[in-house]
Amino acid sequence: MLILSRRLNECIMIGDDIEISVVDIKGDQIKIGIQAPRSIKIYRKEVYRAIQEENIAAARAEPAALPSLDSLLKKKKK
Amino acid sequence: MKVETKAFGPIEVDERQKIHFPSGILGFEDLKDYALMDAPQAPFYWLQSLEMPEIAFVLIDPQVFRPDYRLEVDPAEMEEIGLDDGSAERGEILVFAIITIPEEASQMTANLQGPIIINKDEKIGRQAISTNPRWQVRHGVLKELSTVG
């Protein structure tokens, strides 16, 4: 991994059209500004990971475990 | 087309049920082709991998249990499957949430943070990521059905 030191308001360019800047530093929190073309999708990694993990859990679904919503609602009302 | 499925064993699937996922689904990036099928248990659907019979997802239309649900994703996600902001209004898009079923089925949850979006005409899909933090990975389907409905 490439590691660069940056101060407040300094930038990093990735390729010709992605610019990452340090906008604010407060304690252990750093605000990062990202300028990129619309086609580049940017996510917080923990969100990405959470969805991946949930998909893996969901894919284990056994067909026999799937009830109809109606039957679940009826059970609940009882 | 004969397909080996997790829910129904080997069955005949219509070409029109085939959906291509160019980027796969998160965690299953290598699997690109699926078939969308009605589950016998309403109102659920199966998204069956055509490449790995043991991989299949249960889907639900989020509106069924959250009528207030709105698709909020980056425009680039829509463009990736040939759609735009107006596609929902024009009825060109299908939106689903993946269901996770724990041991106690009544505790099933729906993933609204990573909705499955499908271009109806082109049969191309992807898993988008919600830009609104209100939509989470685990929404209790029954719990929220009774709260909202």
Image (cartoon, coloured by chain):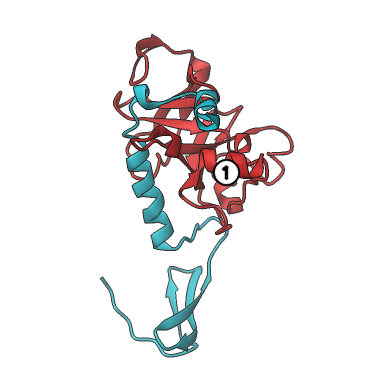
Q: Furthest residue to the left? A: A1
Q: Is residue B77 above or below residue A46?
A: above
Q: Secondary structure at mark 1?
A: helix
Name the residue located 55 percent from the left edge and 34 percent from the top edge: B118
Q: Label 1 belongs to which residue? A: B144
Find residue B128 and report its horizontal and vertical position in percent.
Answer: 51, 47
Crowd rating for badge 1 (residues with CA inside 10 Å; few <14, some 14–19, many 20+):
few
Name the residue located 43 percent from the left edge and 58 percent from the top edge: A47
Q: How many marks?
A: 1
Residue A58 visible somewhere in the drawing: yes
Q: Nearer the viewer, residue B19 or B61?
A: B61
Left or right: residue B125 versus residue A63 is right
Q: Is residue B1 above or below residue B112?
A: above
Find residue A42 and report its horizontal and vertical position in percent.
Answer: 48, 61
Name the residue located 49 percent from the left edge and 23 percent from the top edge: A68
Looking at the rendering, which quadrant does residue B65 occupy? top right
Q: Nearer the viewer, residue B127 or A47?
A: A47
Q: Chain of mark 1?
A: B
Specify the amino acid type for callout 1.
Glu
Find residue A6 and report its horizontal and vertical position in percent.
Answer: 39, 86
Name the residue located 58 percent from the left edge and 51 percent from the top edge: B73
* Quarter of the image with the N terminus of chain B in it: top left
Q: Is residue B44 above or below residue A45?
A: above
Q: Is residue A70 above or below residue A17?
A: above
Find residue B108 and report its horizontal and vertical position in percent.
Answer: 44, 38
**In the rendering, what colour is chain A?**
cyan
Chain identifier matching the red colour in the rendered picture: B
Q: Nearer the viewer, residue B140 or B99?
A: B140
* Quarter of the image with the C terminus of chain B in it: top right
